[in-house]
Every structure is written in structure tokens, then in C-alpha cells.
Image (cartoon, rainbow, N blue to C red):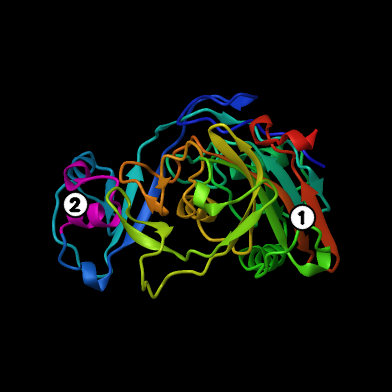
């Protein structure tokens, strides 16, 4: 019930295994509605504030090219907006990079489906990916008859970062997705390695980090817990971004992870990570807060703060969803494993 995924590759490097080639998609409409606080802004300023990946000058160019629809009409002139105005940016087709091919499922009981996601494959449309996603590949497998879609196509219960490999759980029934998503977000407890399944949901990852700070005094087999809250902080390219929360942030989310040192290496540390909560980028942030950012992570540095020049989808780090044990909606337990790629195996793995 498992498949092996290759190590994550930095940046836009092509996948190591079978891949879907670069593709020019059909473009996509992005809809927005003007709020009361945004009334009076000119259209280009509204877009620049709402979607900070582009400055006002670029939005004016898109406006002049006829890409923007304002209350149902294509317009080419900038102007002030009113509350309730509806806008649609018809983004022209763009080129999507090559991505790994999604292998067939490692588990399928007619409702729940688990895949071993390769590193480099985004789960849902985002960050410049529309067609080259895990979701689209699942839909293609259903259309090709490789995956049963009679009860509906499997949809992801949770998300993994583009460059995180390993177990991704899907479900065909919406009720199952909602129930399981809640279990994965809040498993509430960190369990000893020999804990029985009845102790609750367990999510175990393998990660390669920078060497652990000597002052932690962690020896192979030793563990420590990180409880740094996670919250939004300003980011120059995205407006704001999930990071280690600022002190006294009232909206910060509680987050808990346990790091176990499996194997010290000359320039790295091989870690097992158990997470008791499912916060955005939790392992990357907590490893950085620990003083040992994931090796090759361009975004999160010491302290768990994001680098101004990087984005969440930038690759280079090594992280693998290794084991999953969780209760099933109808009763009983599901236990799955996806063996880690070679760079995340310990000598003790044999």
C-alpha cells in the first residue's frame, strides 16, 4: 500500500520520474467584488491592493488590453469603483511547468482514497498552476477508467505543499471529507511512538533540516516539542503570509509539533516530525523556530519568519508525509505508510 516519491527539487527543475510536459492552459477568469472599504478606489489601485503580485501599472496594461470586465462590460479605461461593483479579470492562457505524474492510489475502499504524492506536484490550482495539479490528474484517472468515479471523483481531504511528498488522503463523499478534515486539523495530542491506535489520529513526517543547535542537547532518538503559534505577518509580495506569530497576535493559531532526531549528518539532521495540529506550513515554520530550518527552504529562516523575496511554493526543501493513522467515519482505523525517498531514509531503515 505504498509508493516511493523522489526527493524534492529546488525551483522549477523538471521532475525526476514520469512527468507531464509543459502545457499552455486556456486561461482563467478571477472574480472579485468591491467592498465598502474599497469604494472610491480606482480600478487599478483596487487590483494592486487586492492582488499584490502585480503593481497598478501592470493592471492598467491589462485593462487597456481588454482583460477586465466591470459589471458585465469589458472596459479599457481606469476609474473609481463603487461598493458592490463586480470585476472579473480574464487572465490569458499561460505556460505551466512540467510536473510529476500522479501514481495510482495506494489505498481505495470505495470512499476513501490515498495517494503517495510526488514532490513537485501541486494539490489544487494556485501559484501559477491550473491544469497541472493533483486534482486534475485524479479527474483524468476517473475519465480514463483507472479510478472508480461512480460515487463521485475523490477530492482532497487536506493539502500538502507542492514540494512535500507522501500520503495525501481523499474522499468521494463530502460528509467523509468534512469529518476527516476536522480530525486531521485537530488531532489534539502528541503520542509516544508505541501508543496504540486508540490514542488518536497520528501524522508522522520525515524532514531534512539544518543541523540542530548544539544548545538543544538532542541526541539520536531524543525528542522535543515546539508550540510556537502561527499567524499572518506582512509580506511585500503577497500582502501577508503565515509565519511564526507576532507577539500578542490575537488571531494567532495554536500549533504543536514534536521533533525526533533520527540521524545527525555532517551538514544536516534527519528528523521525524509528529504534528498535533494542521496549520499552514506548520513543519516548515516550527523547524525554523527551533533554529533548524528545513534544508534548502528558501522561505522560512531562523525564528520562523518569511524571507521577503521568496514565496510559499518555492522548492528546495525535503519533507515527506510518511505515516498516517486516523479513525474512520464508520468506525475502525486506517493506517497507511508511504516509504520516504532515499535522502530521507535513515541507516536504521535497512
Residue 112 marker: 1
Q: x, y percentage for residue 335?
A: 81, 54
Check residue 53 for magenta coloring: yes
The residue labelled by disc 2 is: 44
Side (left or right) of 124 relative to 341: left
Counting residues from the start of the chain, the first of labels 2 and 1 encountered is: 2
Q: Number of numbered discs present?
A: 2
Residue 248 marker: none
Report the predominant secondary structure element of the magenta stretch.
helix
Residue ranking furthest to the right: 332
Query: Residue 207 appears in which quarter of the rendering?
Result: top right
Instruction: Give above or below for 212 relative to 173.
Output: above
Q: Which range is magenta?
A: 42-59
Q: Residue at x 74, y 42 (%)?
A: 338
- Between 266 and 272, the residue placed more toward the observer is 266
At numbered mark 1, what does the secondary structure look like: helix, strand or loop? strand
Q: x, y percentage for residue 343?
A: 64, 31
Amino acid at each position: 500500500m505504498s509508493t516511493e516519491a523522489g526527493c524534492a527539487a529546488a525551483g522549477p527543475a523538471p521532475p525526476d520520474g514520469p512527468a507531464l510536459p509543459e502545457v499552455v492552459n486556456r486561461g482563467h477568469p478571477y472574480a472579485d467584488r468591491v467592498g465598502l472599504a474599497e469604494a472610491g478606489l480606482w480600478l487599478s489601485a483596487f487590483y494592486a491592493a487586492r492582488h499584490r503580485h502585480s503593481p497598478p501599472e501592470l493592471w492598467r496594461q491589462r485593462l487597456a488590453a481588454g482583460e477586465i470586465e466591470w459589471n458585465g462590460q469589458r472596459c479599457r479605461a481606469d476609474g473609481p469603483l463603487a461598493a458592490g461593483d463586480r470585476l472579473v479579470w480574464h487572465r490569458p492562457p499561460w505556460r505551466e511547468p512540467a510536473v510529476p505524474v500522479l501514481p495510482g492510489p495506494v489505498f481505495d475502499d470505495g470512499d476513501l482514497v490515498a495517494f503517495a504524492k510526488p514532490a513537485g506536484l501541486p494539490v489544487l490550482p494556485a501559484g501559477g498552476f491550473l491544469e497541472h495539479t493533483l486534482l486534475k490528474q485524479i479527474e483524468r484517472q476517473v475519465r480514463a477508467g483507472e479510478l472508480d468515479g461512480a460515487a463521485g471523483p475523490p477530492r482532497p481531504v487536506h493539502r500538502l505543499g507542492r514540494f512535500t511528498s507522501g500520503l495525501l488522503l481523499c474522499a468521494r463523499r463530502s460528509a467523509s471529507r468534512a469529518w476527516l478534515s476536522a480530525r486531521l486539523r485537530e488531532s489534539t495530542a502528541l503520542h509516544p511512538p508505541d501508543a496504540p491506535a486508540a490514542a488518536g489520529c497520528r501524522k508522522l513526517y520525515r524532514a531534512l533540516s539544518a543541523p540542530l543547535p548544539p544548545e538543544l542537547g538532542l541526541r539520536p532518538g531524543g525528542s522535543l516539542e515546539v508550540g510556537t503559534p502561527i499567524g499572518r505577518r506582512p509580506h511585500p509580495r503577497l500582502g501577508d503570509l503565515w509565519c511564526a506569530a507576532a507577539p500578542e497576535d490575537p488571531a494567532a493559531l495554536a500549533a504543536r509539533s514534536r521533533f525526533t532526531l533520527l540521524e545527525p549528518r555532517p551538514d544536516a539532521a534527519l528528523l521525524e516530525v509528529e504534528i498535533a495540529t494542521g496549520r499552514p506550513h506548520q513543519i516548515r515554520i516550527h523547524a525554523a523556530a527551533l533554529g533548524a530550518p528545513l534544508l534548502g527552504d528558501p522561505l522560512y529562516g531562523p525564528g520562523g519568519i518569511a524571507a521577503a523575496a521568496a514565496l510559499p511554493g518555492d522548492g528546495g526543501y525535503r519533507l515527506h508525509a510518511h505515516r498516517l493513522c486516523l479513525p474512520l467515519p464508520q468506525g475502525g482505523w486506517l493506517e497507511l505508510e508511504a516509504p520516504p525517498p532515499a535522502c530521507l531514509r535513515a541507516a536504521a531503515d535497512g
